[in-house]
Image (spheres, rainbow, N blue to C red):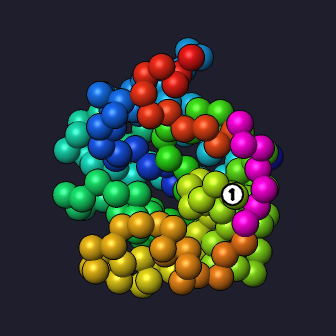
Amino acid sequence: MARHGVTGVLLVGGASRRFGSPKALARFEGETLAERAYRVLATACDSVIAVGKTADGLPLPFPVVDDRSEIRAAMVGLAAGLRAAKTDLCLVLPVDLPHMTPDALRLLADGAENVAAAVPQTGPLPGVYRRSILPVVDQRIEAQDFALHRLLGELQTRVVELDESLLRNVNEPSDLR
């Protein structure tokens, strides 16, 4: 069941330096990582926004909100997603977590009650962030500090324990096996 009042924000604008090609287009279990992540977010949230670089021209089956930045950093995608969202809570998922489940994302969203952010034990992504933190995010970007873990140090954050196997990200093509 989808969580109402939660916007899913899919980050598809990564540099994919180690991967060698756009991770969003890599295939895993019959679908691209982007399709898979979008589907998981759509199951867990009442709406989904994909954020990235429209100039990349990735052939995706859904629209991409341009983050309007030359910088490739999750912080920039977070800011664009928070700006575009119609809800206070934004569940942010990078495209390279193919094992993530809707149930785990719902747990994260539940963990965001009465705090600015909820993240798993492994760090800032995936994470649930409130739109009200946008000024702090913008200040970090203005200061050229793109480290999400340092942003969390400024926010009232709850850590939600998730199954570590769901949090394995894809850095190289061999990680898709």
Tell me which residue sits at (29%, 54%) in the image: 72
Q: Is residue 163 magenta?
A: yes
Image coords of residue 97 (percent x, y): 57, 38
Q: Quadrant of the C terminus?
A: top right
Q: What amino acid does circle 1 point to?
A: Pro
Image coords of residue 23 (percent x, y): 40, 32
Position of residue 50 relative to residue 67, above or below, is above
Position of residue 109 relative to residue 48, above or below, is below
Tell me which residue sits at (40%, 44%) in the image: 12
Would residue 61 be visible to someone looking at this image? no
The residue that label 1 is drawn on is: 120
Image coords of residue 61 (percent x, y): 42, 31
Residues 108 and 58: in front is 108
User: Is 49 on the left-hand or right-hand side of 63?
Assistant: right
Would residue 30 be visible to someone looking at this image? yes
User: Is 107 on the left-hand or right-hand side of 176?
Assistant: right
Position of residue 111 relative to residue 15, above or below, is below
Tell me which residue sits at (59%, 59%) in the image: 123
Q: Which residues are magenta?
A: 159-165
Q: Secondary structure at mark 1?
A: strand
